[in-house]
Image: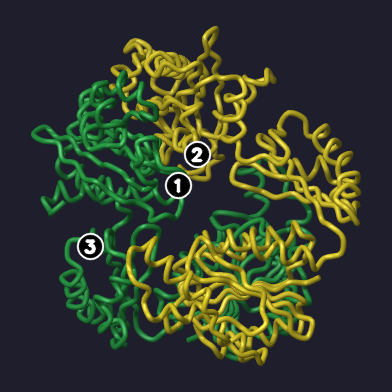
Chain colours: A green, B yellow
Amino acid sequence: MVAELIAVGTELLLGNVANTDAQIISQGLSALGITVLHHTVVGDNPQRLAEALETARNRADIIITTGGLGPTYDDLTKQTICKTFHRELELHEDILEDLKTWFQTKMGKKMPENNIQQAMLPVDCTIFDNPVGTAPGCAFVEDGVHVLMLPGPPFECRYMFEHRAAPYLEKLTDGVIVSHEIKVFGMGESAVEEALHEPMTTLTNPTLAPYAKTNECMVRATARAESREKAEELLTPLVREVCETLGDVVYGVDVGSLEEVVSGLLAERGLTLAAAESCTGGLLSKRMTDLPGASKVFRGGVVSYVNDVKANVLGVPREVLEQYGAVSGETARAMAEGCRRVCGSDLAVSLTGVAGPERDDWGNEVGTVYAALAGPEETICKKLTCGRGRGRDRVRTAAASNALDLIRRFLLKLPL
Amino acid sequence: MVAELIAVGTELLLGNVANTDAQIISQGLSALGITVLHHTVVGDNPQRLAEALETARNRADIIITTGGLGPTYDDLTKQTICKTFHRELELHEDILEDLKTWFQTKMGKKMPENNIQQAMLPVDCTIFDNPVGTAPGCAFVEDGVHVLMLPGPPFECRYMFEHRAAPYLEKLTDGVIVSHEIKVFGMGESAVEEALHEPMTTLTNPTLAPYAKTNECMVRATARAESREKAEELLTPLVREVCETLGDVVYGVDVGSLEEVVSGLLAERGLTLAAAESCTGGLLSKRMTDLPGASKVFRGGVVSYVNDVKANVLGVPREVLEQYGAVSGETARAMAEGCRRVCGSDLAVSLTGVAGPERDDWGNEVGTVYAALAGPEETICKKLTCGRGRGRDRVRTAAASNALDLIRRFLLKLPL
C-alpha cells in the first residue's frame, strides 16, 4: 500500500516551522510496512489543497493530511477534502459538548463560537477523538482511497498518529508487522551498509534498513506475518546475525538513547555518575538529565569552562594545566578524579577539547577531545577526534556521545 | 515571483530525517520577498523526480532542489533535471581537481572514482562552489524558469543557500528587499499578534509578520524599494513603532539568540558569569557555551542535581535544604551565591525547579522553577512557572530562557 502525506499550513511555506509531522508519520508508516512516495506541503489555500488532493488520490491508497483543523477562518482542510470527495459535513453534538467541557476545565473559559467548526465532521467517517487538543481527526474511504485528517501541532499530531491513525491503518494491512531496532554507535552509516550489504539488498521479508542519526545510526529489521509469533520467528535469527556482524558497536536492540542505556547500566549496578565538562559546556550533563528520574544515577557535575574553575573547583593541579595544557589527557584525568571527589559519585567522566571554530593556543586542532573516566580503582582516558570539521555543534555532540560510549564500554568490560 | 522546493531523498520519505532544508530555504526566500507555494518531497527515484519537475515548471518561476548531488548510484538529481530540461552534463576539470585536493587534505585519502560524478555539471550553468562539502551546486535558466540545485545535508544546504543561492536570486527581484527581525521573549505569539493586529493585517509595503519559536517569538518587518536607503526609510518608523508597542519584551533587533544578547551585554560591561543548575541539568551552561569565544564571559558552573552537590560543592546550608526544600527561593539564592564564590565570577545565576514528569516530594507542581542571580551587591530571585504542562523538555528550555532574560533585565536595569 502506498501513502501520501499532505501538510497544510502557510507557516510551513514561510519557513516558520519545519514539517516534523511528515517525519513522525513517515516513521510510523514505515514501521507498518506502508510505502510513502510523496510528501507535499501547501498553504492555507483551498484551491492548491484541492489540486494536491486530486493528484494524491490518483497515485496513493492512503492520503494523510496534517494541519488546517483549527477553529480559525484559514483552517480549511475538512471543507476542502469534503468538497473534493463529495461529502457533506455534519455537526456532532457529543463532540461539541466535549469541546465546551475542555474549554471550561482546561482553559477556564467559555468556548469561542468559532470552535463549533471543530465539531463538524464528514458524514460516515471514523472519528479520531483528540485528548491532547481541541481538534478531533477523522478518516473515511472513498473509491478505495483512505483519507485521514490529523491536527498539525506536532505534539498532537504524534499522539493522534500513534494512538488513532496507526491502529486504523494496521487493520488495512494483511497480518501483522513487527520490527526491531538495532542501535549502533561508533560505526558510520556507510560502513554499516557495507557490512550488511547482502541482507539489506536481497531480503524481502524480513527486511533490513539503515537509518542515519546524528553521530550514530540504527538498523531496523521488519517482518510481516500472519501472527506476531511468526513474525518474531522470522526476526530472531536476523537480529542475532546483525548483532554478530556489527559486534560491540551495537549498544542495544529496541532501546532508547545512548544516555538511557548508560543510565540503565548504572542503575543495574547501583552506581552513580558525575561529569566534569570543559568543551561540551554542560551538554553531557544535560543529556543525562533529559531522562526523568535521572537523580538516581546522576549526581551532577562541574562545567569547568575556564582553567580557574578546573583548578579551584575540581582541584586540577596548576602544574598540570601549565605543563600539558587544558586539552590533554593529564588534565582530563585530573578533572575526572576531582569531579568524582567533589561530587561524591562512584564514577566521574570528563571531557576537555577544542570545540572550535579555531584551534586552541596550544595548536590542538578543532575536534581534538580527551575523555576520561575515574572509578574507585582506576582512571581511564581516551583521545578522540570529534565532528570531522562539521562545526562546533557537531564536535560537542560527538564528544558527549563518545563519553557516554566510554562509560558503556567500561561498565560492560568491552574494549575501549 | 513564485518558487517551489523539491527535496530528493528516500531518507525523508522513511522519516529518517525531517525536511529542515525546506524550512531554511523558505525563510530565506520569504526574506527575499519570493513566494513559496509548494514543497514536495520525492525519493531517490528518477521517474517521480521527473514528474515533480514537470509539475513545478508549469507553476513556478524558480525551482530549488535539495539533495541527490552525492557520489552514489542513487544520487540522480542532476541527471534527472538535465533530462527533463534537455541539457547535457559536462565534466569540469577544475572542480575535479578541487575535489581531489579536498579528499587529500580533509579526509587524508584518495578521491573515490565515484566522486567524478560530482564534477559533472549542466552545460551553461552558474556554478555554486561548495567550501563546506564535496557536492557543488548550480543554477540555470530554461524557458524563463530558474532551476537551482543545492546539496542535501542541512549544514551544507544552509551555507550554500545563504552564500550562493540567495545572492543569485536577489538579482532576479526588482529593486531590493530589506528586512529587520524584532526578537521577543516573554510575550506569546498570539499576544504579539493581538498587539500588532492592525499593522500586520493592513500593511502591504513594508509588511509585518510574526514567527513563533520555541519559548519566544519574532516579528519580521520587510520592505521592497528601489534602493536600500528607500527601504530603510520605510522600515525605520515601523520597527520603532513595533518596539514601542511591545516594550521591554523586545530583546533586540537583528540580533542572535537570547544567549548571544546576554553574552554581548556581559562583554560590554566586562563582567563574567557562572551558572548553578539543578532542574536544567547543564542546559543553561550548554547554551552559553554554544557561542564561540564563550570563555570571555562565561567561566563555567556547577550542575548540582542532587542535594549533596548543592551542599558540598556550592555550600548551600543543609538547614536551608531541609527547611525550605531544594525547590525554593532560599535554595536558589544560596546556589547562586555559592556558585559566584566557587567560580570566581562577577555574576552567577541559578535554577532549581521541578522538570517533571511528576511533582516533587514537597508538592511543588511540574514547571515551578526558582531563578536567582547573585552579584557583588545583591542577590535577586524570581519564581517562574515554566512549560505550561508541555513536558520536561519544554520546562527545562523555558527555565533556561527565563534565567537568561533575568540576566538581561538585571544588566539593563529593566523591571524584573
**B181, A98: nearer the viewer:** B181
**Residue behind mark 3:** A250
Label 2: element kind: loop
Q: In this rendering, is residue B288 above or below A233?
A: above
Q: For the residues marked 1 and 3, what is the alpha-carbon distance in whole angstroms?
A: 26 Å
Compute the Cα span from label 1 to label 2: 8 Å
Q: Amino acid at mark 3?
A: Val
Give the chain of mark 1: A
Left or right: residue A185 compared with residue B291: left
Q: Is residue A61 left or right of residue B255?
A: left
Residue occupied by mark 2 = B292
Secondary element under disc 1, as helix, strand or loop, is helix
Cβ atoms at labels 1 and 2 below 8 Å apart: yes
Please state the chain letter of the residue tagged with numbered disc 2 in the rendered image. B
- Residue type, label 2: Pro
Which amino acid is tagged 1? Arg
How many other residues sit within 10 Å of disc 1, few (<14), some (14-19) or many (≥20)?
Answer: many
> Both on one chain, marks 1 and 3?
yes
Residue A93 can be seen in this image: no
